Image (cartoon, helix red, strand yellow):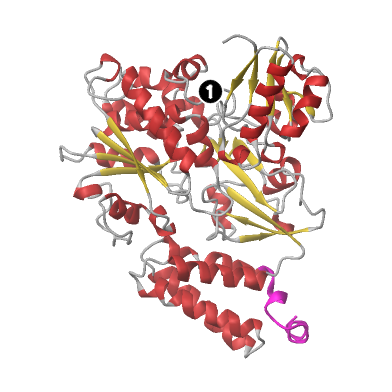
Amino acid sequence: MSGVRVYVPCDAAALSVGADAVAAAIVEEAKRRDVAVKIIRNGSRGLLWLEPLVEVETPKGRVAYGPASARDVPGLFEADFLQGGAHRLGHGPTEEIPYLAGQKRLTFARVGVIDPLSPEEYCAYGGHDGLVRAVKLSPEEIVAEVTQSGLRGRGGAGFPTGIKWKTVLESPEQEKFICCNADEGDSGTFADRMVMEGDPFLLIEGMTIAGMAVGARHGFIYIRSEYPHAIATMRDAVSRAYALGWLGGDILGSARAFDLEVRVGAGAYVCGEETAMLESLEGKRGVVRAKPPLPALEGLFGRPTVINNVLTLTSVPIVLAKGASFYRDFGAGKSHGTQPFQLAGNIARGGLVELAFGVSLDTLVNEFGGGTASGRPLRAVQVGGPLGAYVPAEQLSLAADYESMAEAGAMLGHGGLVVFDDRVDMAKMARFAMDFCAVESCGKCTPCRIGSVRGREALDRIVAGERVEANLALLDDLCTLMTDGSLCALGGLTPLPVRSATKYFREDFVPAPAFERAS
């Protein structure tokens, strides 16, 4: 079908605000005017405050309009938007929008640019190059390349990916597995979903390279049930990859084999923890396993298993295609490469920003995010999901890299930033952290299962003004117990938001007169 190419996102965020209706309205209006158009359903560019973001391909490049609604479509045609005409929703050339132009997109280079399920477009825009190189290398050479790149796990802990892969490679076991943890349950995070919906072949390529690197012939993508569009897109992409010879028994004629399946979680936050995910994949209840043994030695079905999240595995093809030194040159200190930061909460321009590690929180929140959506003063930013610390406004100069965040008593996590203005009650936020842990705990270890409930009770007494100082001391003891004694990060990291709230926003916990005396 010929005609002007018009891009309307099929990303879940765009669908939630009417993207399907916009696409249908463009088709109908074009028919009414006897104008030929070709609708391309792309991923989201990540400018979520402008969704649905409609793009038109013109001789001068793609031109953006948004946020568009179905009722805006006749006016867009009247303004000659198919030729890039001026309109109140117009933003000019897409690539020149400051929010996009200021980024360094490696992982998200194709997201929002191509038809997610077009192998031809994937290859035309640089996809597949990493796999083509990988089939020419030995497993040891692939692992060495990933190790030298400095790539670290993007799931939160930042463990060096090459070391994990080397451990699995050196295991004498014949059967090994690759597991992608796509159970993206943290508040304010959506990068995994966006890349699966917008560039699914990239994840398939990364997992296939991982399989070749460690000698695994089978992989699983574990996706949370709340992501139906990502599940459907990944399944479709996997099917197409098999048809192309990108998966199966003879990948690109190399005689190497790798099979891939999509599995769906059942909605438990704790299954974002790697061993609970393994239990779920094995058909059991999602309960955390004690470590050791590490999954790299005894993982899925007791076999050596590489577990990485989506952003880690989608970085691998870039490392193989461009080389370790190319990737390593981005970032700061021991934090190499780029990080897709996700801006959410009370923020004017929410969305995804991919930049090299080391950018300041202030740059992310104020320059890219535009400050609070309410226009009120910013009070806190929670970094790293519901288990992340609250960073006060006075500390936004903090660099977003693993070492700087850890030194400040915080964590980068999955790169999610949730913004709060000066109306937030931090005592309520601390209580939410304990309550979240109590609700989502798998129940296996006492510090998490019971400590979170006792923490919630202590916070209720503090808010009620009952023996405030004594209960704050008790709360601190509980936090120490949970940090030191919990089996996994759910209980072990819940104290981060609680302690940061009591440290930097103590006035929300101590009644005014008492707080003034303490000061």
Residue 62 seen anywhere in this rendered image of the structure: no
Residue 218 seen anywhere in this rendered image of the structure: yes
Q: Residue at x 70, y 53 (%)?
A: 396
Image quadrant in which you'd find residue 50 = top right
Where residue 71 sits: x, y (%)? 76, 33
Residue interval drawn in magenta? 504-519
Question: Viewer-proximal residue, 144 or 13?
Answer: 13
Q: Which residue bears the numbered disc 1?
A: 115
Where residue 432 sits: x, y (%)? 57, 69
Where residue 279 sits: x, y (%)? 28, 55
Q: Where's the N terminus, which quadrant?
A: top right
Q: Residue furthest front?
A: 32
Give the side of residue 342 with respect to residue 375, left or right.
left
Relative to 419, is 426 above or below? below
Image quadrant in which you'd find residue 233 = top left
* Secondary structure that dominates the magenta span: helix
Question: Viewer-proximal residue, 129 or 92?
Answer: 92
Give the side of residue 243 with respect to residue 464, left or right.
left
Relative to 362, is 516 above or below? below
Instruction: Give the residue type that dot 1 points to.
Output: Asp
Instruction: Assess whether residue 127 is covered by the magenta stretch.
Output: no
Q: Residues within 10 Å of mark 1 (few under 14, many from 20)?
A: many
Question: Viewer-proximal residue, 155 or 79?
Answer: 79
Tell me the element at label 1. loop
